[in-house]
Amino acid sequence: MFSALGLFKDVPCPRVKDCTFPSCIFSHLEVEAEDVPDATKEYDPFSAGRISPPPAKRRKIASPQEQTSRDGIPSTVPSVISTSRKLGQHQPVSDDGSLGQPKSVSKPSTKLLASTPVEQTKLPPSSTKREVSPPPLRKNKAAIPPVKKEFKVETLTPRNVSRAPAVLKTRLSVLQALHKQAQDQNQKLKAADEKWRPFILDEQELIRFALDEEEEATKLGDDIYRNAMAQNVLRIKKMKTEDWVNKIKVWTGLDTGMAQTSKNAKNADLSASSTKQLSVSEEIILLQRLRTSLEGLEKFGYVTAQPTTTEIGAAKAAMSSAAGFEKCDRCGTRFQVFPGRDEEGRLTSHGVCLYHWARINRGASAKTDRIVGRSEASFPCCNQLEGSEGCTEAETHVFNVKHPPRLASILQFEHTPHSNISSSAKPLSFDCEMGYTTLGMEVIRLTAVTWPEGRVVVDVLVRPYGEILDLNTRFSGVTREAYANATGYESGTELQPTDLRKVGSPAIARQLLFDHLTPDTPLLGHAIDNDLNVCRIIHPFVIDTVLLYPHPRGLPIRFSLKVLAQKYLSRGIQTGGAAGHDSSEDAIATGDLVRHKVGEIWTTLHHEGWKFVGGVLKQSLDSQGDAKTISML
């Protein structure tokens, strides 16, 4: 048992004479009855206002058979008490347990408050006596113009939500209908009185209005979404001019002065930014600052060295022992691959493949997940829950190989060779489209454009080494008809952007790219490890937009190119749906993302005093303002 510290030795025991503890930590000094505050009369002396103590609690009275004294002697309580309680009669009870008049409750006197320990422990804070000066008034408050919040540019595409109430096609159709009615009301506003001019919305504001209304409707649930959107479209269609203006006021929260000030500020910013454009040569110089070091990123798929002969031999032995069994990259089924076809003419086993072509959407975590539970994960392609049967059917199962030694067993990796082209060759932004074959995932289209102009220098279809299982048209954009009708590429043939030629192997496509590269040429790409690996290229100077715009949770989690283009370029790409992607569009978007990052770097350097003098980047360092050249490479 721990000994008491004596912290409560001056505090009277709350139970007074009824305390049964042999070593009570409270004080049991003999005090007069009127000096001991009753527990039922305790209150906060610092409470505001006039406070009366609470009424005394009614003491519990037991029957004569159950009530005993603390010394074990039966108590002598008249039986009339229990009888009167049975009859519902309330009899006042005195402190000693006998019947009598109720004890009167009086307000505590000032002497009692001054003598209680509570008064000694709860002293008023010194800050209550301190004089506090009022805060300084803002000068010229009315002269400060309100500034309208700037928003990013958006397209008329439904925003991503944690759980979509309908398929994308349905959401897009109702969004377009809502946007159409908003446009009609805006046209009516233009033809109305001059007083409504400040509430006329531009095209971007109309798009954002429609997106906000549609996003708000998604919170109503699957059953109410369509009906709510239909009523909203009809309501906007029947609105009068005054009603539409009131809705715009609620949506924007801006008055006439705010709207006009915002437009003037926006025009001023655009005119100021146009004066800070860089030349192409200056952009290429700043591009050196974005060089991506791949050292230490091998565990995320970046290949920096050729696999050795021993590693390749071990990979071939593993493939031989697996007897062609692979795991489907789409549905997870275990199946067997037959390169060159088996006796029945099959390339794969286990028949058709049922899968979801879209990645599962688990939704963002919320603080209420611990209480109501996290929403169930679903597939955006069909809105079915996790574990459901696939919504898309393919003829065969497919697989993907990412192990570098196994990739090298098909085609060895090559370093970018030194060529006869000028060392000042322009940077290239390139992108590859891949399809599934009996050897895994191989390149079927390669595109490279110059940076920053976006001029196409290489754009060819590629015949893979293995038999084609699936061209993956939904993502590659390469259809069977276009692939089958493409003419062969001959050396020296001038390639046209609309005339896709087909080369005989990935090695030939790689050589076409090498013809425009040197080891010092910047090579730009998004998730460039995938493109370099399918081409079996090891390049020392790469710039990866995945690393320029990293995900908050870090690798291997990455932002898609579509998300980055929408966020930083306000551009919608990969909008073809089932028609697939366009590698030239992706390559240009990748280059523009890099250019956006170059602009951010130049803004920082410009504020630090850097400037281009005769094509050389210099900074003024000394107090006399003399410019000193500092190497940026």
Image (cartoon, grey):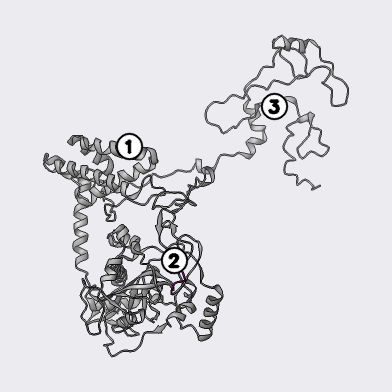
Whole-number angstrom distance, CA of label 1 to CA of label 2? 42 Å
Asked if disc 1 and disc 3 are in contact, CB closer than 8 Å, the reply is no
* Number of residues whose C-alpha sits closer than 10 Å to that of mark 2, classed few (under 14), some (14–19) or many (20 or more): many
Q: Are marks 1 and 2 in contact (CB under 8 Å)?
A: no
User: Which residue is tagged 3?
Assistant: 38
Residue 342 sits inside the magenta stretch:
yes
**Which residue is most to the bottom?**
420
Q: Amino acid at mark 2?
A: Val
Q: In terms of depth relative to the viewer, which is nearer, 324 or 120?
A: 324
Label 1 – label 3 distance at C-alpha = 66 Å
Local SS, label 1: helix
First to last magenta residue range: 340-345
Q: Pointer 2: what residue?
A: 398
Look at mark 1 in the image and give the residue it sits on: 227
Q: Is residue 494 left or right of residue 623?
A: left
* CA neighbours of label 3 inside 10 A, class few (<14), some (14 to 19), many (20+): few
Quarter occupied by residue 320? bottom right
Across and down, in percent, residue 332 comes to: 49, 61
